[in-house]
Amino acid sequence: MPSLFSSARVSEFCASDPACGSERQYAPISSADASFGSVLNHYLNVGQAAGHSPNPFFDEAWYRMTYPDVATAIAEGHVESGFDQYCRNGFSRLSPHWLFDEAGYRARYSDLSEEALAAQGPANGYAHYLRNGDREGRTGSLFFDPALYREQLPEAADASGPRKGLFVTFLRLLGETPERRTTLYFDPDWYRASYPAVAAAIAAGEYRSALHHYLANPTPGAFDPLPVFSEVAYRAAYPDIAEAVAAGNFRCGYQHFLKNGVNELRAAGPQLDLQWYVANNATVGADLAAGRARDAFTHFLSVGLPAGLRGAPLPAPATQQDTAALPDQAEVLYRARGSAVLPVRAVVRPSGIGEGQLAASAFDSWVKATDRQIAVAPMIEVFKKLQDITSPVGFALEHRDDRPVGVAPTFRL
C-alpha cells in the first residue's frame, strides 16, 4: 500500500511520535523498538487490519463511526482503513479526530482560506493546526479552549505546553485523573457523577476520559454535557431539530445548539432560556455588544452563572387548594360517579387510618371481582390520593344477603 505514505502531505499525519501512544496501542512493540520504522511496519502489517489508530492524532474507530461511507468503503475493499481513506482524499473535508473540527477551524480563522493554505503549504486545516495553530494558541474545537486548559496544567506541563502545543499536551496527558476541564461547554466531573455507567466504562479502559465518551459514544442523544442543557427537552421543544438529528444532519441536539441555537437564542432546557436571559438581565446585552463573550450561552456559563443571574423565569407557583374542603369535594365526586355505576349509599363517619387502609384493600378486592372494574377503578385512585394529602380516607363495604352491593367512603372527622 505505497500510496498511504508516499505523498509528502501525509507526513503531517503519520506516526511521527512513537513515544506518544505506540506502546499503548501496539502491545507487541516494546519501548526499545518503538522507532518510526518499527511502528510504521507494524501498523501496515498488523495494526491497520485490526482497526488500530496509526498515531494519537487520528482516531480510527471514531472516524469509521462518524463517516459510515468510509466504513462501507473499507468493507467493500476500496480502501484499507479509515486512515488510508483520509490520506487519499478525506483530508480535504473530513475531521480526523473527535477533538478537531476541520470545517469549524477553517471558518473560525479568516487566514485559513483554500488560497491561503495552498500558499502556506499545509494540506488542510488540521495540518496547519498541528504545524502552527496549536502553538499559536488557536483552537480546533469548541470543546478545547487552550487558555482554560492551560490554567489547570501543573507547572512542568504548562511550561512545555506552548512549545509543543496545548492540543499535543492534551493528547499526551489524556487518561490522567483527575480529568482536566477543556471547555466551558462540558463538565467532566458532573458527567461522571451523572452517568455511573460511563465512569465504569472509563475505568475499564473503553474510553480515555469523560470528554472522549461524550464525543465518541454511539448514542449521543442519551447524554447531557452540562446540568443546564437537556438533550430531551431541547429536541422536544424544537421538533425541527429533532428531525434534523434523526436525519443525521447533527450528531445530537447539543451540536445544533452550539452551532446555531445559541445565536438564535433558543432554550437549552428548563434552567436556561437564552432569549429570556438576554431580555431580563440588563448587563448581558451590554457585555455581548462589547465582545466580552462569544454569545449568550458563553456569557451565562462564564459570567451569569457565577454571578447568580437567573437563566429562565421561575416556575409558576402551584395552585393552593383549601385542604379543609377536600373531603366534601371528594364526597361530591364520589356520589356523582358512583351513582352511575353501582348502588352506593355514602356513609361519613370517624375512621382511623388503619381501618381506612383495610377498607380500601377490601374495596380493591371487590373491584377485581366485579365486571364494573373499568368504571369504578378511577374512584379508588382519587380517594387513595386524598388519603395521602389530607385526613385518612377509607372505604366501607355494604353487604346485602351476604354479598357486596355498595361501597361508601369514610373520612376522619
Image (cartoon, helix red, strand yellow):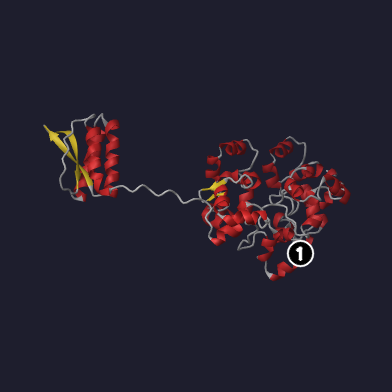
Q: Total label count?
A: 1
Which residue is drawn at the image coordinates 85% and 48% (left, top)? 116
Task: State whether residue 14 appears in this view.
Answer: no
Q: Is 188 placed left or right of 79 in the picture? A: left
Left or right of residue 164, residue 273 in this image: left
Nearest to the observer: residue 211 or residue 2: 211
Query: What amino acid type should be assigned to the residue bearing mark 1?
Result: Pro
Residue furthest bottom in the image: 155
* Disc 1: CA contacts within 10 A as few (<14), some (14-19) or many (>=20): some
Q: Judge whether 37 appears above or below 403 on screen.
A: below
Can residue 386 be seen by looking at this rendering?
yes
**Residue at 38 percent of width and 48 percent of height:** 318
Where residue 57 sits in the image (x, y, percent)?
Answer: 74, 53
Give me the residue at 45% from left, 49% from top.
Answer: 315
Residue nearest the observer in this picture, 108 or 95: 108
* As drawn, 369 above or below 281: above
Where is mark 1, residue-wise?
162
Residue 189 sits in which quadrant?
A: bottom right
Q: Secondary structure at mark 1?
A: helix
Counting from the top left corner in percent of width and height, residue 198 is at 56, 53
Left or right: where 384 falls relative to 48: left
Residue 228, given in percent of the width and then of the height, sits at 54, 52
Observer-nearest of 124 and 108: 108
Residue beneath the point at 78% across and 54% down: 129
373 horizontally vs 43: left or right: left
Question: Residue 342's spot in the image, x, y percent?
Answer: 21, 30
Q: Quadrant of the N terminus?
A: top right
